[in-house]
């Protein structure tokens, strides 16, 4: 009977030692697991931060592209409308009276009138000489 009690007591002591040892190992494993989970969470947070930065940068680039696109389309639109004002300008220039041209026309008319006058005098002199 003492032998049985001794075996039971030794079994309980062994069970206690094994439980304490297992508890320490489990605690150590849980600490390692917690540290690993903390590092993993840190990396996930960094990835989320980088994702947000990338999204913001992408949005800024997209807005910048849209602004430049609108600017270029405006310039192209103005360039397409430019021929009409130039056409109007050339028509206006063409229809604007040219003082030099008028002076030249007046000179030609005056020269023509003189020629006609001289021709008339010549004919009168010729007739008077012939008589």
Image (cartoon, grey):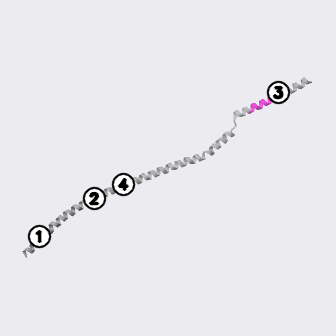
Residue plotted at (15% across, 66% down): 17
The answer to whether residue 81 is above or below residue 105 is: below
Viewer-nearest residue: 15 or 35: 15
Ranked by sequence position, the earlier of labels 4 and 1 is 1
Residue that appears at 8% across and 74% down: 3
Q: Position of residue 93 (x, y in %)?
A: 66, 39
Report, in whole angstroms, how far the alpha carbon at label 3 lies from the one at label 1. Answer: 159 Å
Instruction: Give above or below for 35 relative to 116.
Output: below
Decide: marks 4, 1 in contact (CB < 8 A)?
no
Disc sitting over residue 42 in the figure: none
Where does label 2 land, which residue?
36
Pick the front one: 20 or 90: 20
Q: What whole-number distance in Å separates the C-alpha atoms at marks 2 and 4?
A: 20 Å
The quadrant holding residue 104 is top right
> Where is mark 1, residue-wise?
10
Quarter that holds the N terminus:
bottom left
Residue 117 on the magenta segment = yes
Percent x, y of residue 61: 45, 50
Q: Which residues are magenta?
A: 105-118
């Amino acid at each position: 009977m003492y032998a049985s009690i001794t075996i039971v007591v030794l079994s309980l002591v062994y069970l206690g030692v094994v439980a304490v040892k297992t508890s320490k190992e489990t605690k150590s494993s849980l600490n390692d697991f917690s540290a690993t989970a903390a590092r993993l969470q840190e990396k996930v947070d960094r990835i989320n931060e980088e994702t947000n930065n990338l999204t913001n940068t992408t949005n800024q680039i997209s807005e910048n592209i849209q602004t430049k696109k609108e600017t270029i389309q405006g310039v192209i639109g103005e360039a397409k409308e430019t021929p009409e004002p130039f056409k109007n300008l050339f028509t206006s220039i063409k229809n604007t009276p040219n003082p030099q041209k008028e002076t030249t026309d007046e000179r030609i008319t005056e020269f023509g009138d003189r020629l006609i006058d001289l021709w008339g005098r010549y004919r009168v002199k010729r007739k008077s000489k012939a008589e």
